[in-house]
Image: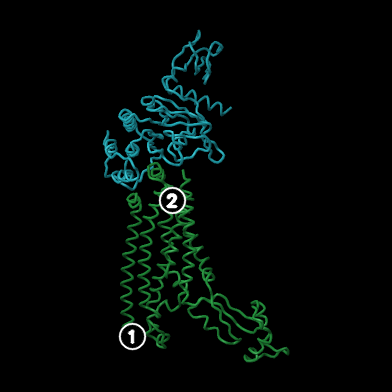
Chain colours: A cyan, B green
Amino acid sequence: MNPLSATAVGKRYRTRWALRECSFAVPEGKVVALVGPNGAGKSTLLRMAAGLVRPTTGELRTFDTPTDGRTHPDVSFLAQDRPLYRDLTVRELTRACAAMNDRWSADRVREVLGLLAGVDRDAKVDTLSAGARTQVAIAMALGRLPRLLLLDEPLSDLDPLARDETLRIIMTEVADRGTTVVVSSHLLSDLREVCDHLLLVDGGRVQVDGDIEEVLAEHRVLVGPVADESAVGGTLISATRTGRQSTLLLRGAGRAPEGWAGTEPDLESLVMGYLRASRERRLR
Amino acid sequence: MIWVSWRRQRPQLITLLAVLVVGAGAVVLLRSNMVDTINSLQLNGCVTRVGPECLEGSRAGDFRGAWTTELNLGQAAILALPALIGVFIGAPLFARELEQGTHVLAFTQSVSRTRWMSSKLVVALAPALVVLIALQSLVSWWLSAAGLLGPRSSGSFHFLNFGIEHASPVAHALFAFALGTFVGVVSRRTLVAMTVTLSAFTVVRFALSDVVGRLVPTQRLEVAAGESLAESRGGNLAVESGWLDAAGQRVSTDRADALAQACKTTAAGVRRTQEEWLACLPRSGLAKQYATFVPEGHAWQVHLVDASIFGGLAVLLLAGTAWVLRRQS
């Protein structure tokens, strides 16, 4: 049973398709990096998984239950704008969230709020820093004891220290409870530390879906002469050509031919390669 | 869930409580001052019946001069309260959540949208209605102390009297509140919801105030030309009046005016006296005058019609609110 699976999911806003024909399955216990440019449909996908948005076509299932305008009891969602009752204190907010849930762990919330810098529980949510607010929002999400945690840009607006703290909260959750996590972010270097699965969405479609190690091993970055690319095998994903040399991102390239230097790409250059390619496709 | 709604609604509830306390205090104080004035002017008899000394004379005049404005303000307050409930409690209830995105917090917890919505509705609406009914009763108690010396003398159907009696204020408040929530979920903007609610409520309220009286059985009075229709007036609600021909058919207003005008002079152009004029009318086809009206004693029927129209609209709007929220993403 996959925590999250999509079958030909599409979502149309008026005339624009935010997602089209998306099919994938998230394996249990994985930490999935959901990456893509702005407007790729990442937020739509997460909101759909949280039961907030209904798919126009296809079906999205959380724990084998179609999301039908309701959040699955085992799913927690951290929205991008961190919706919290800002006129309440942290303590009151905790009480409110506990009252709105059938299953709730006050201990878990206390634990997360007490982690690292800690959050003043009698402060109004409004007065907290962006980092502390994200920490509170994550604490509320974890209080539901989820088996699937959906995080929409959990690291945006955070300073490096808060970013590190937030990542550590997520890693602790995964280590303690084996929670499956889907996290969307632009900060690829940060994601690399916590994620083991990649889901690359662009133009409303899934471009890459797989274990990060495997995906990286499948790809090669080849640097070589501009003149002759005939010896290069595999599928060309993207290429940057300057006056002197070409840098190619290839899938299933095998060994580097004579005159070319081959390396395994890191996550950042892999994602960059795909995004550059899809932008060029759109511009063409 | 009730606690969450209560905590979210706390500022409005405290304001409501303050309105109740201040309003009740003001009414109690004003009423006791007014009763003192009535006693000192020896007008006690005029409260329950209209004697000659109550209509003219300096004492009744003094009293009216001193208290009419205050009493009318008390009535206006009850008349305005439903609109205020709609604008300040109904409109922001969901609009604020949608505007700030906090509905997402509620929608991603275990509580169902329906339960979330109904608990918010109950916590916001019930205290508002309690305060409204309390203040309505207090103002009514104050008005009865003035009796026929006060605004009650203009009859149950007077706009200020009708709007604050019986079930009407509660029905108007329900309607304003439901209108506010509906506009709120559709517009998703607090300020827009508040303004639209105020204008729409005012328009509907005025538009329907003339209509409700026509929806209850009326009584009809027919008199010969020149006789008085006074019996149909007074505190009653006049619905229609005009002329009938010898066959008992209604004569159109234009035609009746023309005929009455024609009777004022003879064929030779000589001006007729009043008696001659009255005698001329039946001959030209204006046999009788009639008036239909709702007697003041039947005001409760009009109140019931009023309450069911506004209550029905409120139910429709609340259903619309629920429908929009269910589809909300």
Labels 2 and 1 within one chain: yes
Chain hosting mark 1? B
SS assignment at label 1: loop
Quarter of the rendering occupied by the C terminus of chain A: top right
Q: Dot 2 corresponds to which residue?
A: B95
Q: Is residue A60 above or below residue A229?
A: below
Residue at 47% x, 11% y: name it: A261
- Under mark 1, the amino acid is Gln
Badge 1: few (under 14), some or many (20 or more) residues near its Cα, within 10 Å? few
Q: B225 or B36, which lies in front? A: B225
Q: Is residue B147 above or below residue A130?
A: below
Left or right? Give the position of B18 relative to B148. Answer: left
Alpha carbon of mark 2 to alpha carbon of mark 1: how far?
55 Å
Quarter of the rendering occupied by the N terminus of chain A: top left
Badge 2: few (under 14), some or many (20 or more) residues near its Cα, within 10 Å? many
Chain hosting mark 2? B
The answer to whether residue B192 is seen in the rendering is no
Q: B170 or B92, which lies in front? A: B170
Image quadrant assignment for residue B72: bottom left
Expressed as whole percent of the image width and height from the top left, the position of residue B132 reads 38, 64
In the picture, the disc for residue B311 is none
Residue at 39% x, 49% y: name it: B115
Expressed as whole percent of the image width and height from the top left, the position of residue A212 reads 42, 22
- Under mark 2, the amino acid is Ala
Q: B215 or B79, which lies in front? A: B215
SS assignment at label 2: helix
Check if mark 2's residue and mark 1's residue have beta carbons within 8 Å: no
Q: Earlier in the sequence, mark 2 or mark 1?
A: 1
Left or right? Give the position of B102 relative to B292. Answer: left
Q: Dot 1 corresponds to which residue?
A: B42
Expressed as whole percent of the image width and height from the top left, the position of residue A5 reads 45, 31
